Image (cartoon, grey):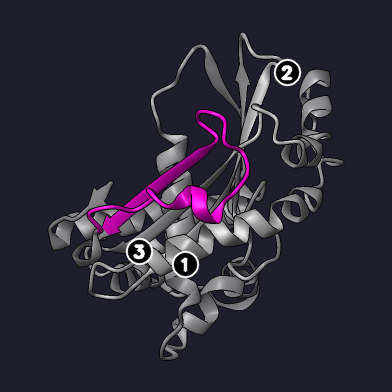
């Protein structure tokens, strides 16, 4: 998918992503989100306890970027994770394969564990569900050579998939009984290469670096899960990914 656009459209897209990020990061605190949004839209700075409150949610990802440190590579990666999440969330629904769980990106791009998990309630299958564990990569080079980033995604998923799944905690989730039973055995399904399990790699990159081929060698680096549909891939291209990520950061940090 390519997200190339005019400066106005880029600014609108950056605002939408910033808004989604802060809505999610503030969780159930609508008051905090509303304070951030009102201040951002009015272009004013929060002060006192309101500043401390909102900064607590924004700082883990955006504080270093706001300080304009050079080569802050975590920011494009984090925005890339959000591009995957929002595109996946907004896919047309399939009555035979409905989304049961789609977790948003982690609180910080360097947090341990898998980058993305989606669980489907899937009719007509042995378990009644399926899942895909996703690894996200970003490539900010100008040439169309993101193959190294894609390869590393498959290698990482191949080597650490069981560990990533074992790190997931569902103890605080209110799940239906059959969903709880399914997610409790994600690692087992992965290790046993069941048809309900699969992996994916998403790479966010500059529009100038769109490759002619991307995932044709996935099976050489991800050597299990050979059943149909076991592997998925997504390329998200945007004009100047790093610059776009900083546009998102500017919106998040406007009130701070």
* Other residues around mark 1 within 10 Å, as few (<14) / some (14–19) / many (≥20): many
Q: Quadrant of residue 33?
A: bottom right
Q: Quadrant of residue 90?
A: top left
Regarding residue 39, the answer to whether it shows in the image is: no
Residue occupied by mark 2: 127
* Other residues around mark 2 within 10 Å, as few (<14) / some (14–19) / many (≥20): some
Disc nearest the viewer among 1 and 3? 1
User: Which residue is drawn at the image coordinates 53% and 18% (left, top)?
Assistant: 97
| Residue 77 numbered tag | 1
Report helix, strand or loop for mark 3. helix
| Residue 17 numbered tag | none
Q: Earlier in the sequence, mark 1 or mark 3?
A: 3
Magenta stretch, residue numbers: 211-237
Q: Earlier in the sequence, mark 2 or mark 3?
A: 3
Disc nearest the viewer among 1 and 2? 2
Q: Nearer the viewer, residue 134 or 176?
A: 134
Image location of residue 177, percent across then percent down:
84, 20
Image location of residue 123, percent across then percent down:
61, 11
Image location of residue 41, percent across then percent down:
36, 60
Residue occupied by mark 3: 42
Cα distance between the residues tagged 1 and 3: 28 Å
Above or below, 228 relative to 87: above
Image location of residue 200, percent across then percent down:
52, 46
Q: Nearer the viewer, residue 73 or 175?
A: 73
Above or below, 120 relative to 217: above
Q: Residue furthest right?
A: 171
Task: Tell whether label 3 touches label 1 (CB within 8 Å).
Answer: no
């Amino acid at each position: 998918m390519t997200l190339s656009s005019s400066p106005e459209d880029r600014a609108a897209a950056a605002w939408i992503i910033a808004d989604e990020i802060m809505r999610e990061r503030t969780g159930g605190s609508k008051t905090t989100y509303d304070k951030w949004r009102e201040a951002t839209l009015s272009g004013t700075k929060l002060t006192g306890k309101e500043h401390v409150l909102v900064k607590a949610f924004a700082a883990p990802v955006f504080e270093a970027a706001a300080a304009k440190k050079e080569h802050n590579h975590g920011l494009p990666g984090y925005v890339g994770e959000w591009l995957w999440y929002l595109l996946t969330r907004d896919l047309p629904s399939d009555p035979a394969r409905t989304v049961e769980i789609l977790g948003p990106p982690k609180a910080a791009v360097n947090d341990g564990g898998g980058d993305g998990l989606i669980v489907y309630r899937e009719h007509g299958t042995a378990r009644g569900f399926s899942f895909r564990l996703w690894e996200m990569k970003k490539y900010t080079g100008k040439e169309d050579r993101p193959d190294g980033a894609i390869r590393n995604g498959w290698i990482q998923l191949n080597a650490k998939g069981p560990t990533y799944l074992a790190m997931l905690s569902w103890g605080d989730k209110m799940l239906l009984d059959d969903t709880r039973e399914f997610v409790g055995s994600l690692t087992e399904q992965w290790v046993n290469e069941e048809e309900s399990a699969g992996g994916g790699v998403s790479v966010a990159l500059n529009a100038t670096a769109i490759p002619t081929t991307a995932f044709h060698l996935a099976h050489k680096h991800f050597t299990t899960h050979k059943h149909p549909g076991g592997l998925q891939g997504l390329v998200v291209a945007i004009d100047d990914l790093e610059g776009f990520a900083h546009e998102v950061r500017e919106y998040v940090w406007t009130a701070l």
